[in-house]
Amino acid sequence: MPIKDLDALEHSNPCANPGLDEILACDPTRRRLLQGGLGAAGLALFGTPAWGAAARAAGRPAIGFAPVAAAAEDRVRVPAGYTVEVLYAWGDPVSDGPAFRDDAGNTAAEQALQAGMHHDGMAFFPFREGGRPSSRHGLLCVNHEYTDDGLLHGDGMKTWSAEKVAKSQAAHGVSVIEVREEGGRWQVVRPSKYARRITASTPCLLSGPAAGSPLLATAADPRARLALGTLNNCACGQTPWGTYLTCEENFNGYFAAGDEQALDADHKRYGIRPQGYGYRWHEHDERFDAARHPHEPNRFGWVVEIDPWRPDAPPIKRTALGRIKHESATVTLARDGRVVVYMGDDERFEYIYRFVSRHRFDPRDPAANRHLLDEGTLFVARFDEGGEGRWLPLVHGQDGLTPEHGFRDQAEVLVKTRQAADRLGATKMDRPEWIAVHPRSGEVYCTLTHNGRRGGPQRPGPDAANPRPDNVFGHIIRWREAGGDAAAGRLRWEVFVLCGDRASPVAHRRGNIRGDVFGSPDGLWFDAEGRLWIQTDVATSALNRGDYAAFGNNQMLCADTATGEIRRFLTGPHGCEITGALTTPDGRSLFLNIQHPGETGSVRSDPQRPSAVSAWPASQFGPAFGTRPRAATVVIRREDGGVVGG
């Protein structure tokens, strides 16, 4: 069963936080207010204009391309006048290492020097040219979320060994590569002194309030200061001091816990199961046996900071940002210069978080900024009726986060972030994914990809922020912090778009999209001019079937947040997810990841039929890429050299 297809699994949040449907059922006036929208009168409480007005006043960016049609082809399709090239595919050498073998014959040691599997979030760090950020030369940090062991090994999972576990671990983590545009094409610079792979075995420092806690201590690391590896690296963030934030998401799937009756309640809250999710690492690496090493799972689920410019510097797990299934770590600055990080917890009925640093960012003192993410306050969001909301602080000793309720200190609040958020009564969301901040208005957007379990017996029903039962299409929510300050305690929110087909015969699934329809929004990113880029991740079990029959393969769209218009920019190959969009500083080269092309419903491909679903990138770019489907970073540009999307 694929770990990513979460609607096939029961959710792990049993707490009884009330939904807004319960609150509003007794107050028809409030319900009418929500049904009528927020309006300028409600927003006047914050002294701000109606939604979209700030973007209009700042000069709304043009969406200058004709949309492409939905498609189900084994290729990346873009608008007329655009080109696509493959930059960095699974198995490509990071620097001067070994080449990819199409028979999956590379060893674990070789895989540790090559691109990992299933590219996801990424960030571009430009070199300086003439005192300005370069748009032709930089470092690219690329996440590798998980592995398809049917493709990774020559005979798949027919046999299982310590070498295969080591290779799977080596295909996880992060790539740091040097890239340059030369002769009209982007290419990886090889060799490069900056290039490196960070894997599920790389030593990572533990930092912040939970570092040194007994809850993170193991026999191998009794001081709880050095964790081995980072894994299930999904979305990401980028700091103003030039470092990369990679997010550990579904870490629970790699652990097995033995007997169901002996499974710890705190482990259950994070979705750890007796036999794991099919990775079978615990059979040859005992640290993934949670029954033998019950604190090892606590060492995952963090935001990890990587300095791409210092290849010898170890990654750092920043525990002040909480332990969840991190999806996104989007960084902005508060009005007074403090650092704010927005984060989603990607599982049904989980929460949206915000971290506010104690100290201010200082652009003149890089050394001082290196520890900004170790001290501050973690908050969880409550989306109240009437379009108002609050940030609830997760601080030991406050609001029931006390020893008598299972929180001995701040370290325990952070290790058990989900339980702390339960205690405070945060709003259960429909799988919070990527978060993006508008570069001009400061409005914050979050994708809620879908939740097929909302409503029904023994399950939370709809509320104002998650208004549909059986929400198979998902939606996007947006909010504005009070006074335009990212560190404010209050906010105003609304649903930006309900995804799905407007013609759906099922009323509660009907969308309200102005433009091209889509579902399961996932990746989210604003370009410098304020265009909102949306990437989708419809599960392979649903692609081109049932409710999703009209949508085609996964896609990327572009939205005008002032008018709500949405246009389809790209469609991907069979079975893939579209993710990780970003551009160079000049906006003329767009990097994008095509994740898991050819993925089957089981995420365990048949090694004897590797191209049964997809042969991409070979299906589009030729046999040099081999027969196995390979996740890859692509570069998209306009033929006339203009700004992408404009």
Image (spheres, rainbow, N blue to C red):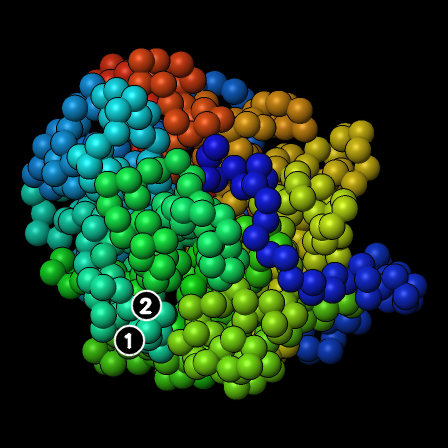
Q: Which of 631 and 452 is in front in this view?
A: 452
Q: Which of 191 and 324 is in front in this view?
A: 324
Left or right? Give the position of 409 relative to 353: left
Tell me which residue sits at (46%, 80%) in the image: 408
Decide if residue 121 is in sight here.
no
Res 319 quadrant in image: bottom left
Mark 2 Cα within 10 Å, few/some/many (few <14, many 20+)?
Answer: many
Quick check: 180 above or below 158?
below
Name the secondary structure under disc 1: loop
Q: Which mark is residue 575?
A: none
Q: Residue 212 carries which label?
A: 1
Q: How many labels does the image show?
A: 2
- Residue that badge 2 annotates: 216
Q: How far from the left and from the top, in percent, is residue 368?
A: 25, 81
Name the secondary structure under disc 2: helix
Tell me which residue sits at (82%, 66%) in the image: 23
Q: Which of 275 and 313 is in front in this view?
A: 275
Check disc 1 and give the amino acid type: Gly
Check disc 2 and give the amino acid type: Leu
Left or right? Give the position of 285 relative to 189: right
